[in-house]
């Protein structure tokens, strides 16, 4: 949509989830410290271009080792 075909974090890398846990945890901490409600955080996954991970070696390894999801 925004003509940036390579700006998506890879869902097949464990480091992606480490990163998201850290960022969301830190944001949650800031909200708690401010006494503000923190009910939802949208990370924009609905704008991922179709097929963006098809050529990813990380995703190929993941799919090969998890046939139940492919």
Image (spheres, grey):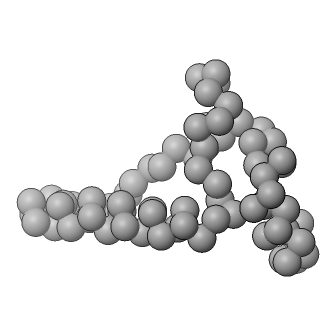
Which residue does the image show at 71% across and 36% down from the upper left? Answer: 49
Residue 43, position as x, y percentages in the image: 48, 49
Q: Is residue 10 above or below residue 25?
A: above
Residue, far left: 34
Which residue does the image show at 84% across and 77% down from the upper left? Answer: 66
Which residue does the image show at 9% across and 60% down from the upper left? Answer: 34
Residue, far front: 57
**Left or right of 44, for residue 11:** right
Q: Quadrant of the C terminus?
A: bottom right
**Left or right of 61, for residue 3:** left
**Left or right of 45, for residue 21:** left
Which residue does the image show at 45% across and 63% down from the upper left? Answer: 19
Q: Quadrant of the N terminus?
A: top right
Residue 35, position as x, y percentages in the image: 10, 63
Q: Report the label total.
A: 0
Q: Is residue 49 above or below residue 14?
A: above
Residue 13, position as x, y percentages in the image: 64, 65
């Amino acid at each position: 949509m925004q003509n940036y075909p390579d700006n998506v974090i890879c869902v097949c890398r464990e480091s992606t989830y480490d990163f998201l846990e850290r960022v969301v945890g830190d944001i949650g901490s800031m909200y708690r410290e401010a006494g503000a409600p923190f009910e939802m955080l949208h990370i924009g996954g609905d704008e991922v271009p179709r097929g963006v991970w098809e050529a990813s070696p990380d995703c190929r390894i993941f799919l090969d080792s998890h046939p139940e999801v492919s």
